[in-house]
Image: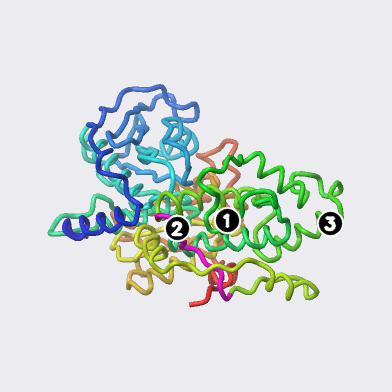
Amino acid sequence: MTQPRRLAFAAALAAAGLALPAAARTAAPSAPRPATCPAAVPADARCYTGADGQGAFYWIAIPKDWNRVLVMHAHGGPETGPPRPQRSEEDLQRWAVTVKAGYAWAGSTYRRGGYGVTMAAEDTERLRRIFVAHFGTPRRTLLHGQSYGAGVAAKAAELYAPAGGAKSPYDGLVLTSGVLGGGNTAYDFRLDLRVVYQYVCRNHPAADEPQYPLWQGLPPDSTLTRKELAERVRACTGVGLPAAQRTPAQAARLKTILTAVRIPERTLVAHLNWGTWLFQDVVQKRLGGRNPFGNVGVTYAAAPEEAAALNAGVARYAADPQAQGALAADSLPTGRTALPTVTLHAIDDPTAFVELEDSYRRIREAAGTADRLVQAFSTERSHSYLSDPEYPALFDAMLDWIDRGEKPSPDSLAQRCAAQVPRFTGESASGCHLQPAWRPQPIEHRVPPRAP
């Protein structure tokens, strides 16, 4: 993206409420200062921390025998509270295998909590420049996005594409457990959860509380806590109790919700949390109270004896096209990137559905860049972190693609991963789980389509 286009794009996002006010962009970044590395990082590595001058904190780790390749990490979430320095430290602890494999690692907290994919992409690039200013230009720079951060990394690959003869600051894109396809595609199902849950349970909001459109998440002055919401869910559905201790009514309500929305029981409360506090952030703080989520025309699955009543009884909302457009402008990848891209997703990811990978593939096909995309899938049930050997396998394969033109395949990624197992052992190094022949269904298989 050229500089004039980038400025115009930033102005559009600011108008939509998705960018930080200019008044906050005043401080100079602090130089990286030495810090004690988290316990999982090799003892002979050097670690640093600092602030980027725009509100974000960061951590950096450089191994003793650095291979001169930097992995820029875009973290998941987003968290709705203010940035915490500990966030990047926790990410470094979690992805310490990157440093063990010889790569330098750098991660930003982002400048504020809440939603803002383009903002987070800018913060990630700002940290890369801080790294270069203090430690020199790496031989290669890989951009690794995890979960929500995969959308951030995909956006950064497009924002900082080659322009005017200048090359991209990034050489390759690695996306794991990705929330891909933009905020509309990725979050619509949480409106489905809110309306179905409320139809079944009638306690979020409760009858004696102010009523509000569920797409708002929560009223601005609400004092509801996550603990209180979890208690309401448990009272209605028995989630959190052993199945044998649930009443027949609780078990029936839970079955209705999970059948209609197609989420696993283990993440029901988490998805309700996002459909509450993250929706509150997106709608009220980023979109000026406008609604980007709709469920008009959705048919919810249910047992034959309750399907008609459920679909007639759930609340229905039409999305505001301008709000949808603003959310898409901030978060929807265009697919227009020349960077070689490798993705890895657990087939049974309970948080970011694996079908989102099909959405991203279709975006890349429409942009004519699918030849630069390789997708892999694993028989894991995790979201936040996959098996240790899988990450260095992705990074090493990416380097061979960049340096030697050896494009990986799902089969070759599985072979690379198996070769990494003897080197990377530990609590999370449970082996490799890649399934080269597996392919996801379209997102419509998981999330019912909306009316046009």
Looking at the picture, tell me which residue is in the foreground, 114 or 290: 290
**Residue drawn at (54%, 41%) of the image:** 422
Residue interval drawn in magenta: 288-297
Secondary element under disc 1, as helix, strand or loop, is loop
Secondary element under disc 2, as helix, strand or loop, is strand
Q: Which residue is mark 2?
A: 343
* Residue 426 percent location from the top left of the image: 57, 36
Q: Which residue is mark 1?
A: 212
Residue at the farthest left position: 165
Q: Residues within 10 Å of mark 3 (few under 14, many from 20)?
A: few
Q: Residues within 10 Å of mark 1 (few under 14, many from 20)?
A: few
Looking at the picture, tell me which residue is in the foreground, 173 or 150: 150
* Residue 445 percent location from the top left of the image: 59, 71
Q: Is residue 185 above or below residue 433?
A: below
Res 249 label: 3
Q: Is residue 355 above or below residue 175?
A: below
As drawn, is 272 to the left or to the right of 322? right
From mark 1 to mark 3, how far is it between C-alphas? 26 Å
Q: Give the dominant element type of the magenta stretch: helix, strand or loop.
A: loop
The amino acid marked with disc number 1 is: Tyr
Point out the frontmost of discs 2 and 1: 1
The amino acid marked with disc number 3 is: Ala
Q: Answer whether labels 1 and 3 touch (C-beta < 8 Å).
A: no
The answer to which quarter of the image holds residue 363 is: bottom left
As drawn, is 411 to the left or to the right of 396? right
Secondary element under disc 3, as helix, strand or loop, is helix
Q: Earlier in the sequence, mark 3 or mark 2?
A: 3
Magenta-colored stretch includes residue 36: no
